[in-house]
Amino acid sequence: MAYGLPSIILVRPRNPLNIGAAARAMANFGFDDLRVVAPHPPVWAEALRAAPGAERLLKKAKLFATLREAVADRTEVLATSCMSRRARALPAQSVKGLRPRAAGAVVFGPEKSGLSAADLAYCGGIVSIPTVADCPSMNLGQSVAVFCWELVRAGPQPFREGAPAAVDDLERIIERCDQALARIGYRGLMDPQVRRNRVRRILLRRGLLKGEAGMLYEILRRILDKPVWGPKP
Amino acid sequence: MAYGLPSIILVRPRNPLNIGAAARAMANFGFDDLRVVAPHPPVWAEALRAAPGAERLLKKAKLFATLREAVADRTEVLATSCMSRRARALPAQSVKGLRPRAAGAVVFGPEKSGLSAADLAYCGGIVSIPTVADCPSMNLGQSVAVFCWELVRAGPQPFREGAPAAVDDLERIIERCDQALARIGYRGLMDPQVRRNRVRRILLRRGLLKGEAGMLYEILRRILDKPVWGPKP
């Protein structure tokens, strides 16, 4: 990983050839970190068998049960979408000129359905390859190839100031938020999961630095440490 | 073909999935003209059967016996290569920023071997996708996807002055050259086919306009019309 190329994450891929093709494109452009979320076991076994030019990358690929776990240490998580399905709540951009942060991740959904709303909750933005209106949906392996090409196309990226917060940092903050709200006996109209997703989205979208995340977490910890507040849990 | 996107030409493709994938990527980016040179018949039959999202393009693809016929009406013919094999006599460039002329063509060789020297004789230049040194060779379908993306990436191309000459115009000139040399009883040390390739390369490399090609052809025709020259054929 010469200059902080992002992880490529495939969520529930269905076709072993697509997995092999994605790994091959990564290898062509120097990407090193393939993560796969909940692949169907026979699909994964077959992908490992037949992947000319990408054996090494597939063998050291990391498998995860959920996208949440796959992005735990990632700082900027971008979902890919052909944007034809429906307008999303996330900020969207074209892949053109894309240069993600170090320790970032680009997430690709299952071939037929794309990423679920639950998966999108862990993504800070959507990136799409601008395709023509009457054939918008790209093949998974080809989509990965175009992303990888575009990400290395501009060459090395200048370093940014300050280490960005990883998804795990954000999750700790969200958990503390929940605890604080429970402690003060808060009963909102909003479903708790929807509220958590909104808080996560606010944090993801702001490009939080690691130091800032630590500060927010510390504030919440101190609030929770005050035993005098509200009704006892 | 919104703004003169080039033809995509696959020479002797071996894998039906790759043909389908190439057509799919073309459809994604609005490319319209697929040409296939000497596909193995069962391979082509299978490609037609299984090509989600690219049926229309595959059904109207044009088949040719030779690359010579496939590029007859094309003006700028670019060969693709991963550049790892050997240094070529042709001018080489990166795909980055590539914007070929109207009625151009981008030619992809067979999966294992790449384009032959005979095929390269009809190409005016080589374009490659810069890949990493230890995994230089791209999958055919993914290579087509990256080329198509890069070719539309910059948006519409400004019109050029003067219509460029097509390969057919050049071939007529080369043929007349041969006849003229035969007429004057020329016996060079060079193999006639090598000489023809060299002449073709000179003409291809200069970006000859249609009017210029017409003039050269006319000059040669007039030379040949003089019956007083040299020994009778």
Image (cartoon, coloured by chain):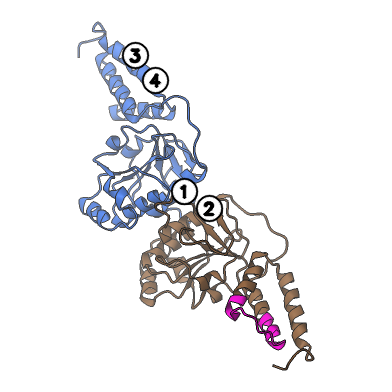
Chain colours: A brown, B blue
Q: Circle 2 is placed at which residue position? A: A150
Q: Circle 1 is placed at which residue position? A: B149
Q: In the rendered view of the protein, which quadrant contains the N terminus of chain A?
A: bottom right
The answer to whether residue B202 is above or below residue B15 is above
Camera-near label (1 vs 2) is 1
Q: CA distance from mark 1 to mark 4?
A: 32 Å
Amino acid type assigned to the residue bearing label 2 in the image: Glu
Question: Closest to the observer: A158 or A189?
Answer: A189
Say which element carries label 4.
helix
| Name of the residue lying farthest toward the bottom | A232
Say which element carries label 3.
helix
**Start and end of the magenta stretch?**
A176-196
Q: Residue B190 at what x, y percent from top left?
A: 32, 26
Q: In the rendered view of the protein, which quadrant contains the C terminus of chain A?
A: bottom right
Amino acid type assigned to the residue bearing label 4 in the image: Gly
Counting residues from the start of the chain, the first of labels 1 and 4 encountered is 1
Q: Circle 3 is placed at which residue position? A: B219
Question: Closest to the observer: B39 or A180?
Answer: A180
Say which element carries label 1.
helix
Q: Are marks 1 and 3 in contact (CB under 8 Å)?
A: no
Amino acid type assigned to the residue bearing label 1 in the image: Trp
Q: Circle 4 is placed at which residue position? A: B211
